[in-house]
Image (cartoon, helix red, strand yellow):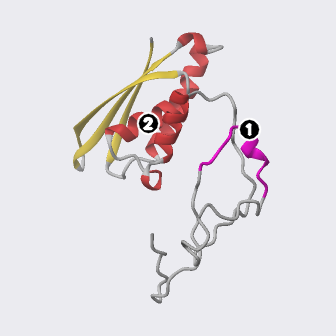
Amino acid sequence: FFPAKRPDGRAESYVNLRVWVTAGMLANRVGPGQVESFLKKGAFSEIRIKNPTSAAGGSNGEDFEEAKRRFAAALLSRDRIVTRADVEAVVRSFDRRIVRTEVALGLERSEGGLQRLQHVICSLDRDAFVDPEIEIRILKDDLDRFLRTRFPYDTNLSLELEWM
């Protein structure tokens, strides 16, 4: 990998990376400066790795499918949703009560001409809600807002929630 260039053409000397290396809650005990390097000595002598902040967010309760969904969502480039797989990964990782997602890509007419449309249908587990009628409205608003901030600017969203 290569460092970014500054406006004057010089290479940056720092880069921020998000790394997931975890042993569940045990990983939350990694304090600032405790990670020094994952690289073999001598192989990359000019690269140093340091963690300026404490590790956080590890848990022991996540199963493989949940971890896969969360990891797929984290792989989005610049947190943008571009492909159908991106939509499915982000929606499924947004709330574990969403058990299935269908995505239909299309076009719709608008005053400015044709625009892309992502029609997203989420199937929900009704038994996972304490007060389904209230919570579904909140979930829909939150998910709608979350998705709209990550779609490309010329893409519209149609979001539908249904019970399984």
Q: Which quarter of the image is occupied by the N terminus?
A: bottom left
Q: Determine the secondary structure under disc 2.
A: helix
Mark 1, residue position: 25
Classify 10 Å Cα crowding around label 2: few (below 14), some (14-19), many (20 and above): many
Specify the segment rendered in magenta: 20-31
Q: Nearer the viewer, mark 2 or mark 1?
A: 1
Q: Tell me the residue at 32%/37% (across/down).
A: 118
Q: Quadrant of residue 31?
A: bottom right
First reached walking from the N terminus: tag 2 or tag 1: 1
Does residue 25 appear to the left or right of 86 in the view shown? right
* Residue type, label 2: Ala
Q: Position of residue 124 (x, y in %)?
A: 49, 18
Classify 10 Å Cα crowding around label 1: few (below 14), some (14-19), many (20 and above): some
Q: Position of residue 58 (x, y in %)?
A: 69, 40
Does residue 115 appear to the left or right of 29 in the view shown? left
Please state which of residues 142 and 67 is positioned toward the viewer in this rendering. 67
Cα–Cα gap, marks 2 and 1:
24 Å
Please state which of residues 70 and 82 is positioned toward the viewer in this rendering. 70
Q: Which quarter of the image is occupied by the C terminus?
A: top left
Q: Tell me the residue at 72%/64% (across/down).
A: 52
Q: Is residue 61 magenta?
A: no
Please state which of residues 141 and 42 is positioned toward the viewer in this rendering. 42
Q: Position of residue 109 (x, y in %)?
A: 21, 40
Q: Determine the secondary structure under disc 1.
A: loop
Q: Position of residue 40 (x, y in %)?
A: 59, 65
Q: Tell me the residue at 59%/54% (across/down).
A: 19
Q: Main secondary structure of the magenta part?
A: loop
Mark 2, residue position: 89
Please state which of residues 5 and 155 is positioned toward the viewer in this rendering. 5
* Residue type, label 1: Met
